[in-house]
Structure formats: C-alpha cells, structure tokens
Image (tube, helix red, strand yellow):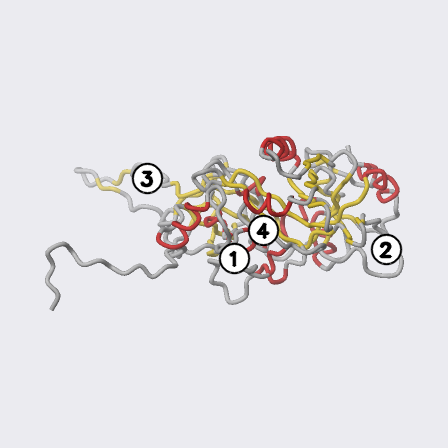
Amino acid sequence: MSPFSARDGFVDDGSGVAAHYGNPLGEQRLLARGAAVVDLSDRGVLTVSGPDRLSWLNSLTSQALVGLAPGVSTETLLLDANGRLEHAARIVDDGETAWLLVERSEVEPLGTWLDRMRFMLRVEVADRTGDVATIGSMHDLLGGTDPLVPVMTSGDTPLVWVDPWREVTIGGHSYAESDHHPGHDWTYRESLVRRSDLDALAALPADRLAVAGTLALEALRIEAWRPRLATEVDERTIPHELDWMRSAVHLAKGCYRGQETVAKVHNIGHPPRRLVMLHLDGSDGVLPGHGAEVVLAPPAGGAPEAETSGGAAEAPETPARKPVGHVTSVALHHELGPIALALVKRGTDEAAPLAVVVDDLLVAAAQEVVVPASAGAAAGVPRLPRLGAVRR
C-alpha cells in the first residue's frame, strides 16, 4: 500500500494507490491546471545500461533511439512478428542509462524478454521498481527555488519523462484529422523519486502539496485521446488503430520485429479497427466498464409495429444488437461529463449514433473520430492495367 493511503479520503483503486481522495472532480480540476500531483507508485521502472543500450533498443523496438540525447523523452513499442502490440515503454536516457517507465504488469515479462535478447552486447537490464517510484503531474515539479518533490537526478540529468504526445514526433504520423488535436493541451509528465522519499512526500499538508487520484488522470488522458497499454491494447492491437504512430513509431528507421506490418498497413492497407472518443449520455447515471460492448444505436422511436392478418397490432421482435466494438477506457470528466475511448470496426459509419451496453441498458454515445476510416494507404500505388486491356 502506498504511503499516500494515510491521506484523508483515500480510496484505493485496487492497486494500492488512490483512485481519489474524496473529491474526484475537484482533484481533476486541480490536476488539469497543474496544481496537484498523482501518486503512480504502482507503476514499474526498468533500466538498461551499457554503451550499446540505445542501438540495441533501437534494433528491437519501433522508435528511433540511436543518438537520443540525455534528458530527452520518447516512447517506443515492442511488437510481435505480425505487428501486434506486446509492450510499451516511456524512455528517458541520462547519458549512461536508459530509464524505461512501464506498467507494473510489464516489469517481469518485458524485463525477462530484454534480458534474453542481450546476447554478447554490452547492456545490462535491471528492475528498479523496488527503490524508484513514479509521480505524475501536468506541470514541472522542478520549478521554483525549493521544489517540494525530490525528483531524482542522474549526473546532471533530472529523471523526468515529458510525454511527447503533444506533437507528431520526427518520423511519426498522425491519422487524427482534428483542427485542434486535444493532445496539444496535454502537458503530462512523470517524475522519478526514491521510494524512501515517499513517506515524507505523502506527509506534506494538503495546502503545500495537493494530490489527485488516478480517476482524475484517466479523465484527462481520455480527453487527450491518449492511448495506454493497460487499457486500449488487446491481443489484436496494432499501433495504427490507436493513432500511436503519432509518438511511438518512426517510419523511416531500420528494421525491427513487426516493421513489415507497420509499413504495409500504413502505406497500402487500412487498420481493421479505429479508436473513437465517445460522449456518453449521463441521464441514467451509469458508466460502462472496460470491455463493454459498443453497438449501433437503434433507430429513433424504435421499429414500427407489425400488423397481423387480422388487422391487430403486435409488438415486433426486438432487433438483434449489432456489435461494432468495445469500450477501452471510461471516466467522468469535470467539463465534458461521461466520456470513453473505444475501439470500433473500421467500417463503422463515422456519423452513426452508437450505444454502449451496460447490463440491461443501452447508453447513447456520440462518437468523436480519432482514427478515421480512411487511415492508412498513405502511399500512392499506381493502378495496374487489366490483363489484355488496350490503351487508347
């Protein structure tokens, strides 16, 4: 259990950190304006040290990492041979060690896989989760002459990962066609602190260090269309479906596992599913859970009554719900109300009204397109003449 559990109003999110401290929407407002921090000590930290670390990680994953400057933040994906997402890591390098910030569930499988892939290269993989913790914020925790949060430094490099989601990174590509991508307002960062400092940090009074729970962070993340491995990814996910090409994939780098699928789908194909943000009807006061089925909304007014041979009206059979996808993340936003991210089939009409199945209810959902149905097929492939055709 996190030392922050001693804070007034603490409600566990199931992983030992706070879902909220009694006022989720108020905490969200504080976090959004950079006036609070989020305890993410349930997350994991791996390190890769040694002179070959960046070229080695570059050869294994989707991002161009060779020459990554100390203190510069990036992220990368580990794909399988078919281009499906297996792992994701947020990376900041200090000049001697690459710090990989990951989901706690990723520490053992990713660390083990990396260790097996070292061969004769000069790299060492270590799990630092036991002595290093993560603090999330929307502002620079190093600001001011006497910062409250004791952010770790390595050499002269503060160990702070600044999310690159705000802009399309060099070598990346965004499918989102929004005039103002909500990621532009996403100023999120993760700072590393020693676990031995958490007790003193958690003991600071609220008027000195305001805290927010993970519910607040999730709501702001959904608003920014920001994908997360723990929620948006399943066994079939490829980066294109989540617009994760924006910040985690370099389309012009050398070979890595899964690159062929990344290139084919981007250049001449289409991802089979696409990410949408859903604005949910909150009149019933219910929120769907992760994995809730997304369906095409029934027509307004329902189906007309059927007429029997005797002229009497008879209720028609309830039409079968047509599933088109599932909810990946959901939250109650302090301004937008109930919102969600969902993966839907690529062919789902972008203007179609949707609904989410919650027990026996259908919750109306208006979709906001993140990845359009036209995503992919970026290369202009010339159409070949039919065999036997005559040019005129």
Which of the 4 image quarters holds residue 323?
A: top left
Amino acid bearing label 3: Pro
Q: Residue 321: x percent and y percent?
A: 37, 39
- The amino acid type, in three-letter code, at marker 2 is Pro
Q: Which residue is mark 3?
A: 319
Do callouts 1 and 3 mark residues in contact (Cβ within 8 Å)? no
Instruction: Decide which of tag 2 and tag 3 comes sooner along the chain.
Output: 2
Q: Residue at x 72, y 60 (%)?
A: 33
x 70%, y 53%: residue: 189
Q: Position of residue 160 (x, y in %)?
A: 73, 52
Disc 2, SS: loop
The residue type indicated by label 4 comes to: Ile
Q: Gap in Å between the C-alphas at discs 2 and 3?
A: 60 Å
Q: In this picture, is 173 found above or below 121?
A: below
Give the alpha-carbon distance from disc 3 to disc 4, as whole Å: 32 Å
Tag nearer the camera, 2 or 3 = 2
Residue position marked by numbered label 2 in the rendering: 147
Q: Which mark is on residue 222?
A: 4
- Please give left or right for residue 182 compared with residue 8 in the image: left
Q: Quadrant of residue 170?
A: bottom right
Q: Which mark is residue 307?
A: none
Judged by depth in the image, the label closer to the viewer, 1 or 4, is 1
Q: Considering the numbered disc 4 on the image, is that residue within a helix, a strand or a loop?
A: helix
Q: Which residue is mark 1?
A: 172
Which of the two discs, 1 and 2, labels the residue nearer the N terminus?
2
Tell me: 47 left or right of 263: right
